[in-house]
Image (tube, rainbow, N blue to C red):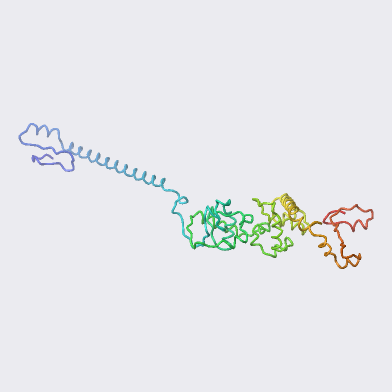
């Protein structure tokens, strides 16, 4: 459609409108021939297509930018396990914690070498006293018995705070440690935590009560705790062997130890330490003076041998001394010893 109005504009056309004036008839005729309704319709339709493609291109660009921003945020955001705010506050008593001082006696590391509190000791104080010890706290070596606190250290550790801020990983590790501690322990593990060992178990296993066992354990000064056993564990195996006379395979099964050679090595270590520090003070001729030996004479021995006041009798037990095998079959059977497995 063509109008003679100079202000006429075609609908839906963003381009300039075609203005037609009466003064140029020849030009109007030419325009009439050149600008037909189909031409205008095609021009408008092509313009709409270009506008739609431009709008669609901008929309795709915005979507791509939005996805790139989401991906960028996802990469930059740290994982939850490393996120610094991934922590909770627990209503749990907490001990004194420091990297420079002992948490028991508060001595500084300038005067004494400090060690990191073992995980077994942290679980021990958590089970017995309900006090949490944070990671990497320091302690003097004299407060440890193996990988656990001794009795004096247990009595000295008290709570300093009633709440603690912990990360999720620390909470998980604490729960796993408590689960492992709640599992049934073997007899070998019970002697590792000597403070929680009951007196009856110690007596039935070693033949000594806990106080007597601790006195003997103090004489193992030459021995040191290792990663696989403590001094009290090795001493318990040695005393159990002396008490029962069982072979090493039976002792290994009784204490649930993996290798038989471990039983042999523990006994040898304890025997060497006791021979150096315990035997000279309590066994042998030099352990007592002569007047002390005289007072040990029994009434039967004094009357039987008509001993004077300055004489004493020595009775030697020859159970483990090997003797010559007799040709007398009756005496041969009587002299056989099961512990020696021979005569």
Residue at 85%, 66% in the rendered image:
298
- Residue 115 seen by the camera: no
Q: Residue at x 11, y 37 (%)?
A: 19
Dividing the picture into quadrants, the one containing residue 301 is bottom right
Q: Nearer the viewer, residue 338 or 106?
A: 106
Residue 77 visible at all: yes
Toward the viewer: 269 or 45?
269
Where does the image place residue 60, in percent across and percent down from the top left? Answer: 32, 42
- Dividing the picture into quadrants, the one containing residue 256 is bottom right
Give the vertical position of 342 relative to 302 (above or below). above
Q: Is residue 238 left or right of residue 47?
A: right
Q: How many marks?
A: 0
Task: Left or right? Give the position of 115 relative to 88.
Answer: right
Q: Residue at x 12, y 33 (%)?
A: 31
Residue placed most toward the observer, 41 or 138: 138
Q: Position of residue 185 (x, y in %)?
A: 65, 59
The residue lying furthest to the right in this view is 328
Q: Position of residue 334 (x, y in %)?
A: 90, 58
Residue farthest along the left direction in this orientation: 23
Quadrant occupied by the N terminus? top left
Res 211 quadrant in image: bottom right
The answer to whether residue 316 is left or right of residue 264 is: right
Q: Position of residue 300 (x, y in %)?
A: 88, 67
- For the C terminus, the image quarter is bottom right
Relative vertical location of residue 10 with respect to residue 162 in this rendering, above or below: above
């Amino acid at each position: 459609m063509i109008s003679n109005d100079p202000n006429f504009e075609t609908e839906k056309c963003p381009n300039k409108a075609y203005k037609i004036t009466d003064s140029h008839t020849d030009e109007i005729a030419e325009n009439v021939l050149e600008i037909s309704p189909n031409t205008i319709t095609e021009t408008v339709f092509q313009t709409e297509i270009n506008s739609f493609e431009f709008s669609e291109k901008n929309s795709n660009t915005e979507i791509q930018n939005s996805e790139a921003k989401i991906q960028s945020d996802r990469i930059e955001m740290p994982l939850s396990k490393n996120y610094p705010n991934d922590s909770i506050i627990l209503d749990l008593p907490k001990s004194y914690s420091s990297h420079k001082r002992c948490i028991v006696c508060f001595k500084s590391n300038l005067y004494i070498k400090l060690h990191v509190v073992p995980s077994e000791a942290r679980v021990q104080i958590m089970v017995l006293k309900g006090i949490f010890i944070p990671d990497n706290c320091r302690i003097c070596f004299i407060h440890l018995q193996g990988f656990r606190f001794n009795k004096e250290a247990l009595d000295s550790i008290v709570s300093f705070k009633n709440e603690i801020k912990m990360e999720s990983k620390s909470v998980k590790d604490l729960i796993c440690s408590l689960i492992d501690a709640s599992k049934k322990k073997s007899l070998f593990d019970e002697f590792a935590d000597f403070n929680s060992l009951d007196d009856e178990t110690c007596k039935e296993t070693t033949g000594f009560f806990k106080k007597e066992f601790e006195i003997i354990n103090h004489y193992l000064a030459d021995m040191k705790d290792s990663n696989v056993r403590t001094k009290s564990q090795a001493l318990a195996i040695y005393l159990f062997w002396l008490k029962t006379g069982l072979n090493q395979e039976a002792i290994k099964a009784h204490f649930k130890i993996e290798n038989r050679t471990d039983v042999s090595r523990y006994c040898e270590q304890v025997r060497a330490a006791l021979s150096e520090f315990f035997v000279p003070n309590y066994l042998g001729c030099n352990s007592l003076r002569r007047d002390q030996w005289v007072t040990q004479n029994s009434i039967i021995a004094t009357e039987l041998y008509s001993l004077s006041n300055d004489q004493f009798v020595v009775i030697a037990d020859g159970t483990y001394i090997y003797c010559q095998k007799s040709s007398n079959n009756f005496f041969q059977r009587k002299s056989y010893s099961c512990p020696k497995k021979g005569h």
